[in-house]
Amino acid sequence: MLGKIHFYFGIIAVIIFLLTGQYMHHNFGHLKDMELMNRALFRAGHLYILLFGLINISLGTHFKISEIIFIKRVQQFGSTIIFMATFLVIYGFFTELPTEQIERPLTRNSLYLILFGVSVHGLISLIKKNKI
């Protein structure tokens, strides 16, 4: 079930990616006249949404929940972190841009969270393969 949630959540994130592209086009003239740093930050935030959506889709297509309760709980924890990171990067896209500063704490934290969540799932996958 968690795999399906990741899969469909990822599809929603990719749709949000498409919609944020339309948002940039209609509200900011597709960033044509925007200062270069703001333009780069907007595009990076936009692409992060796609990346996080694709991570969710990928995880959803290969996810297998463990029957061992402890490992199952760790998988659920990793998934929760990934969901939180995805919400945070989308929220950061709308609240941190455009800006005159290069620092974007919400986006930075979402990147740390996605790294952590994916690492948790990767380690669990290794443990399950090697049956440590």
Image (spheres, rainbow, N blue to C red):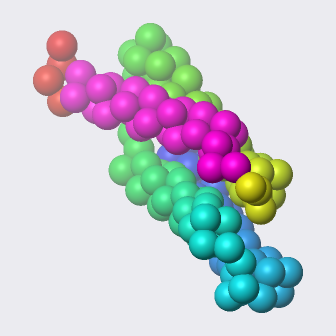
Location of residue 117 in the rendering, given as x and y in whole percent from the top left corner: 48, 32
Occupied quadrant, residue 77: top right
Task: Tell me the residue at 71%/78% (across/down).
Answer: 34
Left or right: 93 in relation to 66: right
Occupied quadrant, residue 45: bottom right
> Does 119 appear in magenta?
yes
Q: How many numbered tags mark residues here? A: 0
Left or right: 16 in relation to 66: right
Image quarter in which the N terminus is found: top right
SS assignment for the magenta stretch, majority: helix
Q: Is residue 113 above or below residue 24?
A: above
Location of residue 124 in the rendering, given as x and y in whole percent from the top left corner: 32, 26
Left or right: 97 in relation to 68: right
Task: Tell me the residue at 41%/56% (across/down).
Answer: 58
Residue 66, visible in the rendered structure: yes
* Closest to the observer, 11 or 17: 17
Location of residue 74 in the rendering, given as x and y in whole percent from the top left corner: 47, 19
Q: Is residue 123 above or below residue 39?
A: above
* Closest to the observer, 39 or 130: 39
Left or right: 3 in relation to 92: left
Image quarter in which the C terminus is found: top left
Task: Tell me the residue at 61%/65% (across/down).
Answer: 37
Q: Is residue 23 above or below residue 4?
A: below
Occupied quadrant, residue 14: bottom right
* Closest to the observer, 103 or 42: 103
Residue 14, visible in the rendered structure: no
Q: Which range is magenta?
A: 101-127
Task: Tell me the residue at 51%/33% (across/down).
Answer: 112
> Does 132 appear in magenta?
no
Q: Is residue 51 above or below residue 78?
A: below
